[in-house]
Image (cartoon, helix red, strand yellow):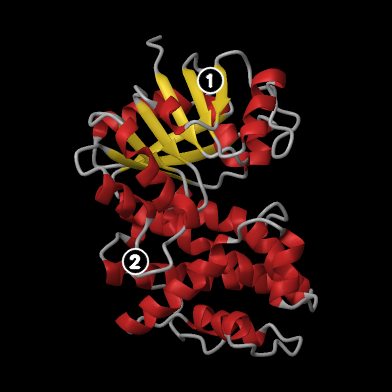
């Protein structure tokens, strides 16, 4: 096997697990993080105690807080929260080669406008091949070697082939897709509906309700995707339906956890404090509400959630206030 230098930017649970997967395939992997002491601990104990304490990271994975250590990497995977993505991307510019593959594994949108993480990479690195890594990927389960799958999406076939080889194992399958915009949109939008499903769980609304929210949410995602130029069929794959089901149904999802806390009666601030980590769906909700209004795309669940989260509308213990005014048609995008 041709050993490469692969860098992963972001030392949270997902970044650590991605670095681990690449190291299993024999590559020399560098894990960058801001916390100098955490990096030192990983190098000494081969463990990220804070995020994935039971995962042995192995000898060919090293960590540091020095961004210059990513120099000469053939592949760089960005896995930092969306709020920090632009800053970290800009910080990395002088250390990334023009022919390096750049991958975003961050699911979210920027606060201003509707910029996805790949848009930021395209802005900073116009000559580099860029890919999107997205799917139903709960890091804690992958760390336990539970069978999982993800999607690498790019217009660049060589990039897709490279990432499939770099990250695939007998328990982690990587599939390819040629619609990076649709794959990235699916990964960002599903967090909104995970909050809605969490609220339904908090209200003890039952499985029928959760199934309805997921399905109606998928319809909303498809309407917005079509309007913005993505292929709604992409949402039938792992980065759409797969990620939606996992995030909406799993108690490991921070967005689901947040929604459940709202459902049982906590305030937004109380729920955010209880979670204690980034809740990507909150920011995505605000951005998607603005863009759907601007483009006149009907998204009743988005509208209702926005009123509850940002306008202080009361749930009144009823899931009807999450679903809002629904659209009569069941299945869309059928010619």
Which of 90/109 is in front? 90
Query: In the picture shown, does residue 43 fall above or below 97?
Result: above
Residue placed under numbered mark 2 in the picture: 225
x, y percent for residue 127: 19, 39
Label 2 secondary element:
helix
Quadrant that contains the N terminus: top left
Precedes in sequence: disc 2 or disc 1: 1
Q: Which residue is mark 1?
A: 23
For label 2, the crowd category at 10 Å Cα-Cα, with few meaning under 14, some 14 to 19 and many 20 or more, is many
Query: For this view, does 155 lie left or right of residue 7?
Result: left
Which residue is at 33% across, 69% downward?
Answer: 333
Q: Decide which of 287, 330 is in the foreground and name it.
A: 287
Q: Which residue does the image show at 74% across and 76% down from the upper left?
A: 263
The circle drawn on residue 177 is: none
CB-based contact (under 8 Å), mark 2 and mark 1: no
Task: Give the Cα separation between the discs numbered 2 and 1.
Answer: 35 Å
Residue 40, how many percent across, how many down? 65, 25
- SS for callout 1: helix
């Amino acid at each position: 096997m041709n050993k490469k230098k692969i860098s992963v930017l972001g030392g949270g649970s997902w970044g650590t697990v991605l670095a681990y997967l690449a190291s299993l395939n024999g590559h020399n992997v560098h894990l960058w993080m801001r916390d100098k002491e955490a990096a030192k601990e990983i190098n000494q104990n081969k463990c990220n105690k804070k995020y994935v304490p039971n995962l042995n990271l192995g000898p060919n994975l090293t960590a540091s807080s020095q961004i210059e250590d990513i120099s000469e990497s053939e592949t760089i995977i960005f896995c930092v929260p969306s709020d920090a993505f632009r800053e970290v991307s800009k910080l990395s510019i002088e250390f990334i080669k023009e022919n390096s593959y750049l991958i975003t594994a961050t699911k979210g949108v920027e606060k201003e406008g509707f910029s996805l993480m790949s848009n930021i990479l395209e802005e900073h690195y116009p000559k580099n091949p860029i890919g999107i890594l997205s799917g139903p990927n709960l890091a804690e389960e992958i760390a336990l070697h539970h069978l999982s799958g993800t999607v690498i999406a790019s217009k660049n076939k060589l990039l897709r082939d490279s990432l499939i080889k770099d990250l695939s194992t007998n328990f982690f399958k990587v599939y390819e897709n040629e619609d990076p915009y649709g794959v990235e949109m699916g990964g960002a939008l599903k967090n909104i509906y995970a909050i809605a499903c969490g609220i339904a769980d908090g209200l003890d609304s039952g499985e029928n309700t959760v199934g309805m929210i997921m399905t109606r949410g998928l319809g909303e995602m498809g309407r917005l995707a079509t309007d913005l130029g993505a292929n709604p069929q992409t949402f039938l794959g792992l980065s759409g339906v797969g990620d939606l089901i996992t995030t909406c149904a799993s108690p490991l999802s921070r967005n689901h956890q947040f929604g459940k806390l709202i459902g049982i009666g906590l305030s937004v601030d109380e729920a955010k404090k209880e979670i204690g980590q980034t809740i990507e769906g909150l920011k995505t909700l605000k951005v998607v509400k603005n863009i759907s209004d601007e483009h006149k795309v009907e998204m009743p669940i988005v509208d209702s959630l926005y009123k509850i989260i940002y306008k202080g509308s009361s749930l009144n213990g009823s899931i009807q206030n999450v679903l809002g005014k629904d659209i009569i048609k069941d299945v869309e995008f059928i010619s």
